Image (cartoon, rainbow, N blue to C red):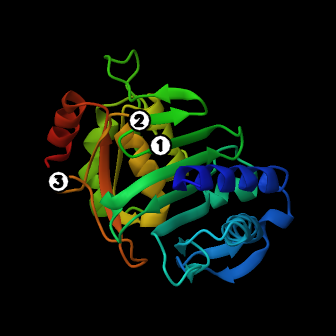
Amino acid sequence: MQPIQVLREASRLVYENVKNLAGTKAAGKDHGTGAGGDISRKIDIVAEKTVLDYLKKIKFDCVVLGEECGRVELSKKPEGFVIMDAIDGSANAVRGLPFFCCSLAFATEDRLSSITAGVVTDLSSGDMYWATKGKGAYCNKKKIQVHKERPVYKIVGVNVSGAKPQLVKRIQPLFENSNHTRHLGANALELAFFARGLIDVYVDLREKIRVTDMAAGYLIAKEAGGIILDQKMKPLDSNLAYETRLSFIAAANNEILREISKQLKL
């Protein structure tokens, strides 16, 4: 099986196993601290186990890098890495807010830029966003692309969760110059929405994002025609280590990118 087929099936199984768990009391049960440093909830554990069990069942030769489970070597001769955030937007999932997803990516090497397949499944609706490097991005069976026309309402996504006062002051012009800022609580799904053309620019300069949070969304957004840069306005790339923390700007086109960079004085 091709990596994209493996990821799509694993993601589908996660949807089937957690769609009735979200928002229940059981979903938020504390299972200790995961490899990523956050508290693992039951819904996280169920989702991760679903993926791991499936990969073991089909004997997929890989190393899994998981938000909760950490590094799991499933083969002595791995063909690459499966980068997994089985539940992105755990707080939403536990409370029952319908905005959380399963994010799975496959990379041939220890670099973000080596990702060749990515799947983000909206675990509320079942919509599956997916991409293979060089072959475009899709939502279910429909090819998608970032919004290329001048929007009726420009939607600016800004992640400010836990942001320090200095950063809030720095990005204040984004709020001042836009009547339509959004942060919905699941970075991978927000990048998928960006790829679909529902958000025009998405900014996260907190230096808090882990690779597991955005690996799949990164490829899907790029394959949909999006521009993804780091805080130095260079093409986004990094290793896949747990310690790595990222900042990024995803823009639909160069015009919006210039506008945002001017406001942020980048």
Q: Quadrant of residue 236?
A: bottom left
Q: Nearer the viewer, mark 3 or mark 2?
A: 2
CA distance for labels 2 and 1: 6 Å
> How many residues crowd around disc 3 within 10 Å: few (fewer than 14), some, or many (20 or more)?
few
- Please name the residue shown 76% across and 67% down the image: 46
Q: How many marks?
A: 3
- The percent position of residue 206, horizontal first and vertical second, equals 35, 61
Q: Secondary structure at mark 2?
A: loop
- The percent position of residue 111, horizontal first and vertical second, equals 32, 67
User: Which mark is first along the chain, 1 or 2?
Assistant: 1
The image shows residue 242, relative to residue 160, as above or below, that is below
- Please name the residue shown 43% across and 43% down the image: 220
Contact, mark 2 vs mark 1 (Cβ under 8 Å): yes
In the picture, measured across the screen, residue 58 lies left or right of residue 258, that is right
In the rendered structure, which amino acid carries the disc numbered 2? Gly
- Please name the residue shown 72% across and 43% down the image: 124
In the picture, measured across the screen, residue 42 lies left or right of residue 82, that is right
The residue beneath circle 2 is 136
Q: Which mark is residue 234?
A: 3
Contact, mark 3 vs mark 2 (Cβ under 8 Å): no
In the rendered structure, which amino acid carries the disc numbered 1? Ala
The residue beneath circle 1 is 131
Q: Which mark is residue 160?
A: none
- Please name the residue shown 59% across and 50% down the image: 5
- The percent position of residue 92, horizontal first and vertical second, equals 66, 53
User: Which of the pair 214/247 is nearer the observer?
Assistant: 214
CA distance for labels 1 and 3: 22 Å
In the picture, measured across the screen, residue 57 lies left or right of residue 246, that is right
User: Which mark is first along the chain, 2 or 3?
Assistant: 2
In the rendered structure, which amino acid carries the disc numbered 3? Lys
Q: Does residue 206 appear in the picture of this structure? A: no
